[in-house]
Image (cartoon, helix red, strand yellow):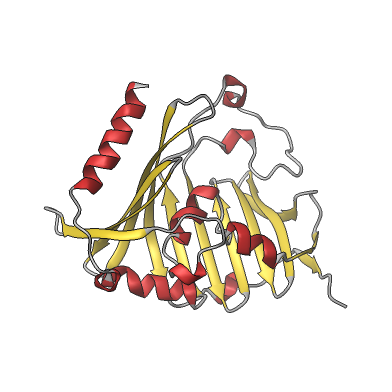
Amino acid sequence: MRRNKWMAAAVLGAFTLCLPFNMASAGKLDAYRNMLAQRNCTISYENITPAEREHNRDSSNLSATFGRMSTPPLYTHKGYKGMVVMQGEDRYVETNYGDYSKCQLKKGSDVYDFKREVKKGKETWKSFDGKATVVASEFQPEKELLYGESFGTSDVSRLLGVMLPKDRIPAGQPVYNYVGAGNLPNGQSYEDYKASSAAGLEAVRYYFDGTKLVRIASASYSRNGAGQLVGRKCILKIMDFSGTPDSSKLSMPAGLKAKSLQK
């Protein structure tokens, strides 16, 4: 509970000091916002803040085949790397835990989910059923209109989704407002955004080295069903965020076949 109180105080303290600014003055993030809105980009990142454990059952080092489980328990509470590539309606999303990756490729109205595994130094790509053919599922645009586009995990989807223009924010999702900017002693600068509701508050800070986006950090607090104050933080290290889509990722990996729903 002490940590949660500290988290809430830190969030409120940092953003109370920020004076309101006009949205147009948030110029450094605008370039990245436009890449996402235009669906023309490659993003590589590392999440250095894994989710907290909920119980001890997920602390075991499991080695069995996980079948359709999207994230094996072995990797649930570790940091991870990821990639997002978008070009028009096509999209590739990968969440990488080193020797295991969860991958999704969207081609038109077909969505393919598959996994990458490395065993004894050998890399293989398979469906979650362990087969060499991936059967497409149908893209559900109404789901994205309600819940937003998926860029991997919920943390990453939220922090990238904050960057979208307000008219692109999904129905029912919080709108983040620009509240300030500043410079740091190490030569970097930042821009701050926040969203608040009756449930709590979330603050997001984007760090820049010159005009290059290098880090995204967020802190939030809310009350759970028992009325207890709970906090959450997330830090993404941005390795690459460019307007050049990596076209090699927008097709099936070698050795993996796609079965489309389209005739």
User: On the picture, is 47 further left or further right than 170?
Assistant: left
Left-right relation of 213 to 86: left
Residue plotted at (43% across, 51% down): 46
Q: Which residue is found at the position 58% from the left and 73% from the top?
A: 248
State whether residue 222 is above or below residue 259: above
Point out the residue furthest to the front here.
198
Q: Quadrant of the N terminus?
A: top left
For the point 74% across and 54% down, the residue is 126
Residue toward you, 103 or 106: 106
Tell me: 123 left or right of 29: right
Which percent across, then down, holds residue 82? Answer: 50, 55
The x, y position of residue 75, in whole percent, is: 57, 37
Give how far across and how far down residue 141 sits, in percent.
Answer: 68, 67
Q: Is residue 80 visible?
A: yes
Identify whether 173 is placed above or below 88. above
In the foreground, 148 or 111: 148
Residue 191, given in percent of the width and then of the height, sits at 26, 60
Regarding residue 190, the answer to whether it shows in the image is: no
